[in-house]
Amino acid sequence: MSLFEKFGQYQEMCDYFEQRGTMPFGAVTERSLSSTEAIVNGHRVILAGTNNYLGLNFDPEAIAAAQRAIEESGTGTTGSRMANGTFAGHVLLERELAEFFNTKAAVLFSTGYSATMGMSATLAGPGEVILLDADSHASIYDGVRLSGAEIIRFRHNDPADLEKRLRRLGKRTEKTLIIVEGIYSMLGDIAPLAEIAAIKRKYGACLMVDEAHSLGVMGDDGRGAAAAAGIEADTDFIVGTFSKSLASIGGYCVSNHPELELVRFAARAYIFTASASPSVIASTRVALRLMQQRPELRKQLWKNARQLHEQLTELGLQVDSHVSPVVAVKTESMETAIRWWEELFQKGIFVNLVIPPASPSTYSLLRCSVSAAHSTEQIQQITDAFSTLTA
Ligand code: PMP
């Protein structure tokens, strides 16, 4: 017996992939060629497994702003927001986010993970209840575990199951936080937010929506799934990330509850970590503006999503019926998924391989995601590669 015995399973997995001569996890991007192409592990590939929904990672204005910020403010803040790490850019970005979401307050976190985890850990505590969708992201699960609240899961995207569990809580619903996502990261399915908000209202609970994959993708100006469903007024807290549509790194929470300002003094994920670098904040501010100024990016994203979804469905692959920028191909067997991932990679297509327990069920996934920056031809090339896979 040793502390390290539990790591044996990972060694077995690494050995398995080494024998096959591939390693899908942690593949190295050696050179970026554009928003949609790169040299990965020595192969030129079309990037079909990123979260670069609007394709803004090489925007010249965002790059210039980041370069200026480095020259003016240095490479890092070297401290927490509560100590020495609050720079003018952080305050401006918070103001711009609050304005964008039309909320009273906005708080930045250093990553999307720490925003979601930190808020999930802080909003409810001992003696209170958190009701979360069973397919919630790891950052939500990690946060609620830290919260000390009673944790209850409801069936994925099932408002009736949510209501059943709320009903059982009686008066405790007033001290209950419901957590859902806008678009779910693995399958790209969208939460039934109008129904969830109606139930939340009926029982007087609080609602937090993680818009990590829906910012820039849904709603007016890309405000997200809550905006698209018309339930912003019912959404107590929106959390999200800068690492997808805004092509940088960092996270945020916005709310009309003035108490959000006080979360700064309560959320350990906010207090005990260094703030985002000035260059990151600068490029995020530009991307947030471009997202609003260039609605054609969102249009192109959905056009690409429809094209890929339609073409992969026509090939007879196991793809869910909803259309979204995440198009996941399911396989019953993990071996098939791994072999398909390798074949796609050899053919110059990079997708995400997702195997249990990271996938939402027992199946494995080839998770594709589209970007506004993909051309029609690139989407066709992705489809062509899928069409050659052998059963
Ligand atoms: N929430 C969800 C739903 C996510 O999918 C992710 C990232 N995949 C995060 C939070 C964390 O965001 P980040 O990677 O920017 O830390």
Image (cartoon, grey):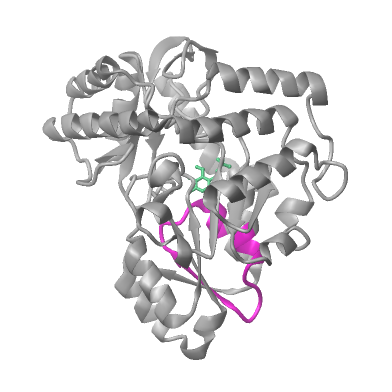
Nearer to us in this view, 14 or 172: 172
386 displayed left or right of 270: left
Residue located 61% across and 35% down the image: 249
Residue 146: in sight, yes or no? no
On screen, residue 213 above or below 77: below
**Where on the picture, by quarter, is residue 104?**
bottom right
322 displayed left or right of 245: left
Residue 206: in sight, yes or no? yes
On screen, residue 323 above or below 296: below
Q: Which residue lies furthest to the right in this view?
A: 84
Residue located 53% across and 39% down the image: 10
Image x and y of residue 25, in percent = 49, 30
Report if residue 89 lies within the magenta region.
Answer: no
Please identify the quadrant where the C terminus is shown: top left
Residue located 34% across and 22% down the image: 342
69 displayed left or right of 16: right
**Where on the picture, by quarter, is residue 268?**
bottom right
On screen, residue 114 above or below 295: below
**Where on the picture, by quarter, is residue 375?**
top left
Image x and y of residue 152, in percent = 48, 73
Residues in magenta, as a range:
119-141
Report if residue 127 lies within the magenta region.
Answer: yes
Image x and y of residue 110, in percent = 68, 42
Q: Residue furthest bottom?
A: 171
Nearer to us in this view, 52 or 317: 52
Image x and y of residue 108, in percent = 67, 47
